[in-house]
Amino acid sequence: MIYFYTIRQEYEDIKSSTYHLPKLDIKFHLLADILTMQLEALYLEDHQEFLAHLRSVKFPKAASQGYIKVIDSCYKYAKDTEAHQLSYEARAYCPLAIEFLLLQLHFVSLEIRASTAISINSKTERLYEQRDRIFSTCHLLLQRYSVCESYKVAVDGAHTRFINGQAIPFEVWKAIAQVMQKENF
């Protein structure tokens, strides 16, 4: 208990002191947002594989409930990535806006797979329209800003995979990471 008191006391002393701790660079916040969304996408993709296995071993009701939860999560994260994309595009961080568009696309592709697994056709049609809108926005940013040109390979790879009904593969995320590393982001 004494240890807790001393740490708390030190925290209060620092908080009330006249000097301020330096704020983290905005770059680290942006990268943290990207990594968080990528981890969520990977988790949901793995969860869908588990649900497909669950359905194949004769637990369709539990799998259907799981798919509904995945759909809800994908919808929420797609909205979050859309908000990030709009924010970064407004701040002239266009390459990051493209990355968030690709993340949004990943969540949409996962949502399509889950909707197809439990036969929600009306939702699937809306998601295909959303997919087309995301790709047109990606291509618009690629045309408008020359700094985004290095993301063209990733966008084209995602487009090819998505049209074939597959989720965005690891290779696309690897290409994005290489682009970010080259730009010393």
Image (cartoon, grey):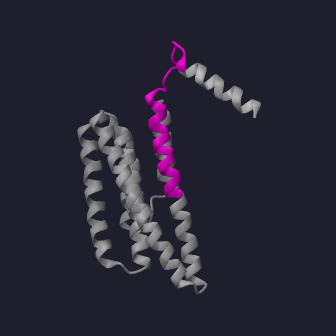
Image location of residue 49, percent across then percent down: 55, 70
Measured along the vertical axis of the image, is residue 8 above or below residue 170? above
Which residue is situated farthest in the top direction here?
Answer: 18
Q: Nearer the viewer, residue 111 or 80?
A: 80
Q: Residue at x 48, y 38 (%)?
A: 31
Magenta segment, which residues? 16-42
Q: Main secondary structure of the magenta part?
A: helix
Depth order, front residue of 122/142? 122
Image coordinates for residue 122, horizontal then vertical, percent:
28, 76
- Residue 55, how many percent across, how many down? 55, 81
- Quarter of the image where the N terminus is located: top right
Q: Is residue 161 visible?
A: no
**Position above or below: 115 against 148:** below
Instruction: Count up the numbered dots.
Output: 0
- In the displayed structure image, the side of residue 146 where residue 42 appears, left or right: right
Question: Which residue appears at 59% of the width and 24% of the height?
Answer: 12
Instruction: Give left or right: position of 132 versus 103.
Output: left
